[in-house]
Image (cartoon, helix red, strand yellow):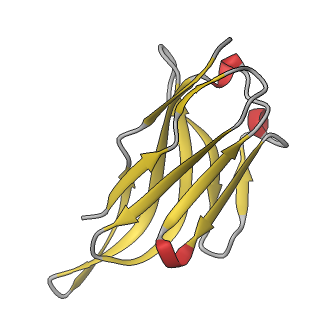
């Protein structure tokens, strides 16, 4: 099974920056896309940004030109650099990975999720 562990959340003032990290571990054969989602209280989970193993990125309109997603394939880690943060960015941020696991002689493709990290933007 693939495990994802996020870090880097916290409290920041409007206009500030944070960098989230998410490391994948387990019997990983390969990881295709990795991404960041967020869920604010009373709202549905939404895509923030995603990146393929080849480095192609996709951003939600509300974070374009403010957030940057990147990944280190050798470390199975994805990052989210968040700049010019706004109060409306306050949410729990979740990491996801579309991975292929190798176990007991077979390959399994699955979508895994991290436990989430709280980001609060407030003065």
Identify the image quadrant of residue 110.
Answer: bottom left
Whole-percent x, y for residue 117 in the image:
45, 36
Q: Is residue 55 above or below residue 62?
A: below
Camera-nearest residue between 75 and 101: 75
In the rendered picture of this protein, how many numbered marks are placed on residues?
A: 0
Question: Is residue 22 found left or right of 120 in the rendered image?
Answer: left
Question: Is residue 30 found left or right of 33 in the rendered image?
Answer: left
Residue ID at (45%, 63%) = 98
Q: Residue furthest bottom?
A: 105
Give the quadrant of the C terminus. Answer: top right
Camera-nearest residue between 31 and 81: 81
Residue ID at (52%, 21%) = 40
Camera-nearest residue between 84 and 94: 84
Give the quadrant of the N terminus. Answer: bottom left
Q: Residue furthest right?
A: 65
Question: Is residue 50 found left or right of 40 in the rendered image?
Answer: right
Whole-percent x, y for residue 103 in the image:
20, 79
Residue ID at (58%, 71%) = 72
Whole-percent x, y for residue 94 in the image:
47, 41
Residue ID at (18%, 88%) = 105
Q: Residue furthest left?
A: 104
Question: Is residue 96 found left or right of 16 in the rendered image?
Answer: left
Whole-percent x, y for residue 35 in the image:
56, 53
Q: Is residue 46 above or below residue 41?
A: below
């Amino acid at each position: 099974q693939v495990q994802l562990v996020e870090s880097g959340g916290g409290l920041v003032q409007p206009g500030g920056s944070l960098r989230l990290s998410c490391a994948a571990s387990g019997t990983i054969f390969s990881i295709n896309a990795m991404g960041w989602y967020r869920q604010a209280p009373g709202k549905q989970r939404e895509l923030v940004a995603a990146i393929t193993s080849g480095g192609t990125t996709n951003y939600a309109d509300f974070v374009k030109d403010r957030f940057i997603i990147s990944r280190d394939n050798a470390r199975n880690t994805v990052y989210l650099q968040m700049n010019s943060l706004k109060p409306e960015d306050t949410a729990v941020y979740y990491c996801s990975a579309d991975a292929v696991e190798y176990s007991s002689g077979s390959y399994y493709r699955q979508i895994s999720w991290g436990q989430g990290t709280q980001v609060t933007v407030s003065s």
